[in-house]
RNA sequence: GCCUCAGUAGCUCAGUUGGUUAGAGCACAUGACUGUUAAUCAUGGGGUCCUAGGUUCGAGUCCUAGUUGGGGCGCCA
């Protein structure tokens, strides 16, 4: 039975002097006259293992010394402690067998590559330190999110991925159809698969609300699709979102939940990915660990939209877009605000005209109980609101915004039957990973990113 | 969608005012080396200078179009 390198790091003393069988990929191979060193990675951990091999032990020494980065090998050897060396232990090989060769044109070399080059080799880039670390953290963050909610008795809801309603008024959607578009002359949606026009989901929120009004506390966690022609470091056409929804709760409960969740995720990544975090801190964003520790130990700031605009107006900064009461924040405004507050900041009480129909109208009749959490680098990390639970208010907003409500009858039923105040938010998984790792491009935290004009792999 | 920058060896890049045979580091190949760890040292091979067209005695360099990628902004939970 083969051993994983992670086990060797976890129980080094137990393996001292023992024979182990390892399978993995060569990261680097340095040979000398009578002996050589292989840096082996088997994917079980960020760390590599140094394997020492000697000509007097291996009968295939010459061949092994020629193996290049990328080769997969099987190694039978003995673990020895090396307390005086750079690495705590190494494996002295008894036998090394080549399993899969790697020709000299293997794109991943033991050197620095540009992110752009690695994006074009998305199938191989995960073999580098950076992407190995990013995608292990992505897995750990995903698990942390489930742990956080499950520990709090939240129900995990699988919202549908295909939906007919575009009630949210969100942007462009990917259409789903089985019509033979190459031949159909006039499109008749009643002849389409669902008998009506359907799209990939842009949000699971409305469905989550239905389940929150039965389970009290729920969350969704799944892929989301946006067909916007957005070309930025923060936007992808396919990404993952987490959308908790809590009943008998208001906007303050909502913000508290978001803050607790984000801190929980950060702590869990610190606990489970210390090597990865060290790597990010050293090579991706200097001071990352300190920044996140500070976030863990401080209360998130809160400012109303009006206060935020005032701060911008009084800043003396010349913005390309003039900050204005009642209007949305531009990217440069968000950046200024996160710098001003020196950490995550909730912007609350947004003008109703620039927010969605389902957000609860405040008593001033001008603003809604919405909150956006802004963080440096990842921009809008969380967006949420208390939902409008009052039927008459909801119907008025639907009318004001000219939304077709024929698909919303079931959503309104949630108010008609046992309605209650409730709230929720959406967290962009990729933006969370960007924030935690310091990686500043969303295309580098998605395994095979989809963006406009790019659906390779 | 708008603006902007770039494309030179497998990778990262340099390339002067338009001038003779286009360079470096890493990688690769061969060799040296009894503890390397982004090993080191020596030698060597490796180029459709993104594509097409144009200006010129002469284009990697200048012009036009296309294409691919980066960045900024917008759109956007």
Image (cartoon, rainbow, N blue to C red):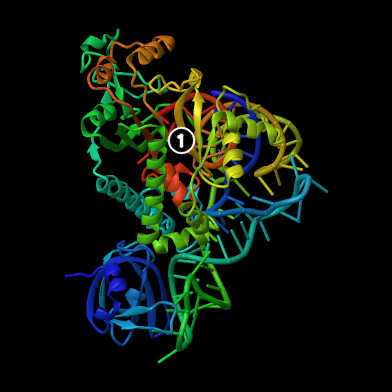
Residue drawn at the location 34% of the way across and 33% of the way down = A249
Residue A282 point in image, percent of width and height: 52, 62
Q: Residue furthest left?
A: A1
Q: How many marks?
A: 1
Asked if residue A94 can be seen in this view, the reply is no
Between residue A450 and residue A145, name the one nearer to us.
A145
Residue B15 point in image, percent of width and height: 70, 52
Q: Residue furthest front?
A: A363
Q: Is A84 displayed left or right of A224 in the figure?
A: right
Residue drawn at the location 28% of the way across and 49% of the way down = A147
If the image is split into quadrants, where does the N terminus of chain A sit?
Answer: bottom left
Between residue A17 and residue A422, name the one nearer to us.
A422
Residue drawn at the location 30% of the way across and 22% of the way down = A199
Residue A149 point in image, percent of width and height: 28, 44
If the image is split into quadrants, where does the C terminus of chain A sit?
Answer: top left
Residue drawn at the location 35% of the way across and 24% of the way down = A174
Classify A448 as above or below A327.
below
Between residue A75 and residue A338, name the one nearer to us.
A338
Residue A126 point in image, percent of width and height: 37, 54
Asked if residue A446 can be seen in this view, the reply is yes
Q: Which structural element holds mark 1?
A: loop
Q: Chain of mark 1?
A: A
Classify A414 as above or below A233.
above
Q: Which of the 4 quarters of the picture holds residue A71?
A: bottom left
Q: Is A290 displayed left or right of A238 in the figure?
A: right
Q: Which of the 4 quarters of the picture holds residue A41?
A: bottom left
Q: Which residue is mark 1?
A: A235
- How many other residues sit within 10 Å of disc 1, few (<14), some (14-19) or many (≥20)? many
């Amino acid at each position: 039975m083969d051993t994983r390198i992670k086990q060797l790091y976890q129980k080094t003393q137990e393996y001292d002097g023992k024979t182990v069988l390892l399978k993995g990929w060569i990261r680097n191979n340095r040979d000398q006259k009578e002996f050589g060193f292989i840096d082996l990675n088997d994917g079980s951990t960020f760390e590599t293992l140094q394997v020492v091999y000697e000509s007097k032990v291996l009968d295939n020494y010459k061949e092994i010394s020629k193996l290049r980065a990328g080769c997969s090998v099987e190694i039978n050897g003995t673990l020895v402690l090396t307390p005086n060396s750079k690495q705590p232990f190494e494996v002295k090989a008894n036998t090394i067998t080549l399993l899969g060769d790697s020709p000299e044109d293997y794109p991943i070399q033991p050197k620095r590559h540009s992110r752009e080059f690695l994006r074009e080799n998305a199938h191989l880039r995960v073999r580098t330190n950076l992407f190995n670390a990013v995608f292990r953290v992505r897995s750990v963050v995903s698990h942390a999110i489930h742990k956080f909610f499950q520990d709090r008795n939240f129900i995990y809801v699988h919202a549908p991925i295909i939906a007919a309603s575009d009630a949210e008024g969100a942007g462009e959607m990917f259409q789903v159809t089985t019509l033979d578009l190459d031949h159909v002359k006039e499109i008749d949606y009643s002849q389409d698969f669902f008998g009506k026009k359907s799209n990939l989901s842009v949000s699971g929120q409305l469905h989550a609300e239905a389940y929150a009004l039965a389970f009290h506390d729920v969350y969704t966690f799944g892929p989301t699709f946006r067909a916007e022609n957005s070309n930025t470091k923060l936007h992808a056409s396919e990404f993952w979102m987490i959308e908790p929804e809590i009943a008998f709760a208001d906007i303050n409960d909502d913000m508290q939940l978001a803050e607790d969740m984000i801190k929980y995720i950060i702590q869990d990544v610190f606990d489970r990915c210390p090597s990865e975090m060290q790597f990010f801190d050293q090579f991706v964003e200097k001071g990352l660990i300190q920044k996140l520790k500070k976030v863990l130990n401080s209360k998130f700031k809160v400012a109303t939209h009006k206060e935020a605009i005032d701060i911008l107006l009084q800043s003396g900064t010349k913005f390309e877009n003039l900050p204005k009461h009642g209007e949305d924040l531009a990217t440069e405004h968000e950046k200024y605000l996160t710098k001003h507050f020196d950490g995550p900041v909730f912007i609350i009480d947004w003008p109703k005209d620039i927010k969605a129909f389902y957000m609860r109208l405040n008593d001033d009749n001008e603003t809604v109980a919405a909150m956006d959490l802004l963080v440096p680098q990842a921009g809008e990390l969380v967006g949420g609101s208390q939902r409008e639970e009052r039927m008459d208010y909801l119907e008025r907003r639907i009318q004001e915004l000219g939304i077709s409500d024929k698909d919303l009858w079931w959503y309104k039923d949630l108010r008609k039957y046992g309605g209650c105040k409730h709230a929720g938010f959406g967290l962009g998984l990729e933006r969370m990973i960007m924030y935690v790792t310091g990686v500043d491009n969303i295309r580098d935290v998605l395994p095979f990113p989809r963006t406009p004009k790019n659906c390779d792999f």
